[in-house]
Image (cartoon, rainbow, N blue to C red):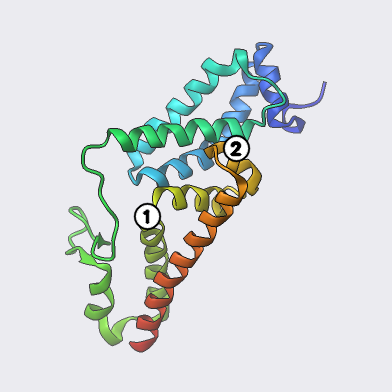
């Protein structure tokens, strides 16, 4: 018998169905972090993302007896994760909307006053060096991703962070592949616009 490391995800699920708990541990080790990262970027809250990630794998355990090998494991697990994120968003009474005016950096425990994204550039002036701009650009990227519509954001995350093919993304979210490609195009256009505006401001103060 091959080592667990040599088995595909689907073969690991079959092994787990036969009672090999090590197979599930292997799946958990392999997919725990990317599933968590996907959820965290969707819900924007680490503790909630951790809870939802655990729920995903609990559902994998519960659904293992009915899992069939022809179903790709990643499609199955991210469908579960995506549905949990959608349910969480629907239950949330006050979902924090990300925008260019949303405070970034600092925080209650940092001792620093929180600034809006627009204020970051204006306040720091000529003291901003290239390294600081690089760090801020990463922050702006996260903010820009959060500002995408839910439909665009989930497609962008699956494509760019999980390297999922458009066909698989379409299976996860349950829409035509052309729709997925369209949402990805709009997401990229929106992100490019926001980040180009930031680069222009950053270059102006160097």
- Quadrant of the frame with the N terminus: top right
Q: Residue at x 54, y 35 (%)?
A: 78
Q: Secondary structure at mark 1?
A: helix
Residue 97: horizontal and vertical position, in percent?
A: 27, 52
Q: Secondary structure at mark 2?
A: helix
Q: Residue at x 20, y 63 (%)?
A: 114
Q: In 3D space, how far apart are the residues under numbered discs 1 and 2 (Cα atoms)?
A: 23 Å
Q: Which residue is mark 1?
A: 146
Q: Which residue is mark 2?
A: 171
Task: For the residues labelled 1 and 2, say whether their Cβ atoms are less than 8 Å apart.
Answer: no
User: Of residues 160 and 155, which is closer to you in this image?
Assistant: 155
Rendered position, 129 above or below 99 = below
Rendered position, 12 above or below 156 = above
Query: Residue 193 lies in what quarter of the image?
Result: bottom left
Badge 1: how crowded within 10 Å, few (<14), some, or many (20+)? some
Asked whether the viewer can see residue 172, the reply is: yes
Asked whether the viewer can see residue 164, the reply is: no
- Quadrant of the frame with the C terminus: bottom left
Query: Residue 99 lies in what quarter of the image?
Result: bottom left
Q: Which mark is residue 138?
A: none
Residue 94: horizontal and vertical position, in percent?
A: 21, 42
Badge 2: how crowded within 10 Å, few (<14), some, or many (20+)? some
Q: Is residue 144 left or right of residue 23?
A: left
Furthest toward the right, the residue is 1
Residue 145: horizontal and vertical position, in percent?
A: 41, 57
Ranked by sequence position, the earlier of labels 1 and 2 is 1
Q: Nearer the viewer, mark 1 or mark 2?
A: 2
Q: Residue at x 37, y 63 (%)?
A: 139
User: Of residues 173 and 27, which is closer to you in this image?
Assistant: 173
Q: Residue at x 81, y 25 (%)?
A: 2
Residue 40: horizontal and vertical position, in percent?
A: 40, 44
């Amino acid at each position: 018998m091959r080592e667990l490391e040599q088995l595909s995800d689907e073969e690991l699920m079959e092994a787990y169905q036969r009672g090999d708990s090590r197979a599930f541990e292997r799946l958990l080790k392999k997919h725990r972090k990317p599933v968590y990262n996907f959820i965290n970027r969707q819900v924007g809250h680490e503790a909630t993302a951790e809870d939802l990630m655990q729920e995903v794998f609990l559902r994998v355990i519960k659904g293992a007896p009915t899992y069939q090998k022809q179903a790709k494991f990643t499609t199955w697990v991210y469908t579960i994760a995506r549905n949990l994120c959608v349910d969480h968003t629907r239950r949330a009474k006050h979902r924090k909307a990300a925008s260019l005016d949303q405070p970034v950096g600092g925080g209650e425990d940092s001792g620093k006053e929180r600034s809006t994204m627009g204020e970051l550039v204006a306040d720091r002036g000529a003291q901003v060096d290239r390294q600081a701009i690089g760090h801020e650009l990463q922050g702006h990227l996260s903010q820009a991703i959060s500002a995408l519509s839910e439909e665009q954001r989930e497609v962008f995350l699956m494509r760019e962070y999980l390297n999922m093919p458009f066909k698989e993304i379409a299976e996860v979210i349950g829409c035509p592949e052309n729709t997925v490609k369209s949402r990805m195009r709009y997401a990229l256009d929106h992100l490019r616009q926001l980040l180009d505006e930031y680069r222009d401001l950053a270059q102006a103060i160097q």
